[in-house]
Image (spheres, rainbow, N blue to C red):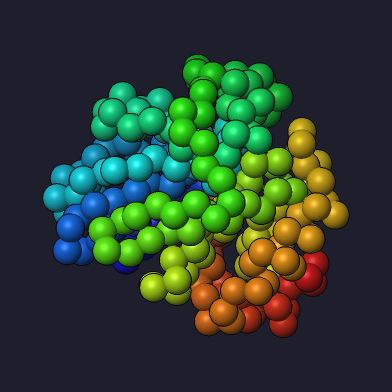
Amino acid sequence: MIVSRFTFNLFGVNTYILWDADSREAVIIDPGMTKETECKQIDDFVRENSLKLCHMINTHMHIDHSFGVSYISRKYGLPLEANKEDQFLAERIQQQAKMFGLPISVEDLNINTALVDGQIINVGSEELRVIHVPGHSPGGIAFYSPESGFLISGDSLFQRSIGRTDLPGGDYNQLINSLNVKLMTLPGETVVYPGHGPETMIKDEKDFNPYL
């Protein structure tokens, strides 16, 4: 599976398109586009690579990872897939914008398809495994590809850091437990693609992450 990364909006969110080179099936994760130029980047990439977007999935429902959800839904006819524990955040997108003092127009959202721990999402001949990693948000999830050896970690795990837990629904102890039990048990060579910043590896975070 091929991982293509785009960095969007004032929060520097990593939006990912994961795609299969043979079938051209693809998923978009955490669409964070806020401008026409950012939306065009996605559209051009999909068209130029002859991709078929089959899923739109969110690691969690904080506003910075959700700016582009409505656009992708309308443009490609895709439902929003995420963990239902974050529904309360999805339906408060406008409130989140006000909390951060963002002078933009956004729509409240609804999680259409519930993703649960252990669920499999097929992308061509490979699969993504849903891992529930609560703590940054109650419904935080990560996506693991055993065949390609990578993890999309959202805002749970970063290079030498972890997600903040001071937002509504955050829980520091829960996040640390989630990371140790759910993510640090993955193979050390697993490449981690986070919601912000550069990629890392599970073995490096085990050795050098000061929070773990």
Camera-side residue: 84 or 189? 84
192 w.r.t. 77: above or below: below
Residue 19: percent from the left, percent from the top? 29, 57
Total label count? 0
- Left or right relative to 187: residue 53: left
Residue 94: percent from the left, percent from the top? 60, 19
Camera-side residue: 169 or 209? 169
Q: In the current view of this chain or complex, which residue is farthest to the right?
A: 173
Q: Residue at x 79, y 60 (%)?
A: 176
Residue 181: which quarter of the image? Answer: bottom right
- Left or right relative to 92: residue 13: left
Q: Residue at x 76, y 36 (%)?
A: 169
Can residue 64 be seen? no
Q: Which quarter shows the C terminus?
A: bottom right
Camera-side residue: 137 or 132? 132
Residue 107: percent from the left, percent from the top? 50, 18
Q: Which residue is drawn at 34% across and 48% down?
A: 27
Q: Which quarter shows the N terminus?
A: bottom left
- Left or right relative to 189: residue 71: left
Q: Residue at x 73, y 73 (%)?
A: 209
57 w.r.t. 209: above or below: above
Residue 40: which quarter of the image? Answer: top left
Can residue 20 be seen? yes
